[in-house]
Image: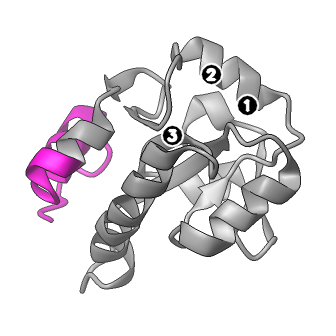
Amino acid sequence: MVDVLSGRRLVTREGAVVEAETALQNKVVALYFAAGRCAPSRDFTPLLCDFYTALVSEARRPAPFEVVFVSADGSAEEMLDFMRELHGAWLALPFHDPYRHELKKRYDITVIPKLVVIKPNGAVITNKGRKQIRERGLACFQNWVEAADVFQNFLG
């Protein structure tokens, strides 16, 4: 479980509510800071969607990976529109949860989109997840798993 999200409720793009502890247990977590009105976010999100789908949805053995979207949208409606239009089947911190702002400060988010991959204790594995996915594709995930020390036997 990712300690920084302990006790939080997350939502799916369909609006279902899930407990963070259950959804994120034993997984590498990528915090995705983005907004639908941001052209670079709209450019990168489909690539992240493909990355996520290849690792989680289409893999013979789903990878221990989860994305948590932290919206920088201007309203809950904008956030949901962006999620429904371009996002993968990952999770999001609800728009009205003030913790979104604390996470932005904690991880020093000054520009979006930003993909911050974190360990279960909240320590940063990389704040360059976007760049790594663009440059290395699925190959970067194995490094994240090893750094997170989540599943020692995961072979990709």
- Residue 144 position, x and y percent, is 23, 41
* Mark 3, secondary structure of its residue: strand
One can see residue 15 in this view: yes
Question: What is the CA distance from the residue labelled 3 to the residue labelled 1?
Answer: 11 Å
Residue 29 belongs to magenta span: no
Note whether residue 25 is visible: no
| Residue 104: mark | 2
* Residue 143 x/y as whole percent: 14, 41
Q: Which residues are magenta?
A: 134-156
Residue 18 falls left or right of residue 115: right
Please say whether residue 153 is one of the residues in the magenta stretch: yes
* Residue displayed at 49% across by 24% down: 111
Question: Label 3 to label 2, Cα distance in Å?
Answer: 10 Å
Who's the residue at 44% across and 51% down the image?
26
Left or right of 143? Residue 86 is right
Q: Residues within 10 Å of mark 1 (few under 14, many from 20)?
A: some
Q: Residue at x 17, y 58 (%)?
A: 153
Q: Where in the figure is residue 6, as x and y percent of width and height?
A: 70, 36
In the picture, the disc for residue 31 is 3
- The reply to whether dot 1 and dot 2 touch (C-beta < 8 Å) is yes
Depth check, front residue: 19 or 112: 112
Q: Nearer the viewer, residue 149 or 136?
A: 136
Q: Give the SS element for disc 1.
A: helix
Q: Secondary structure at mark 2?
A: helix
> How far apart, in angstroms, are the residues tagged by discs 1 and 2?
6 Å
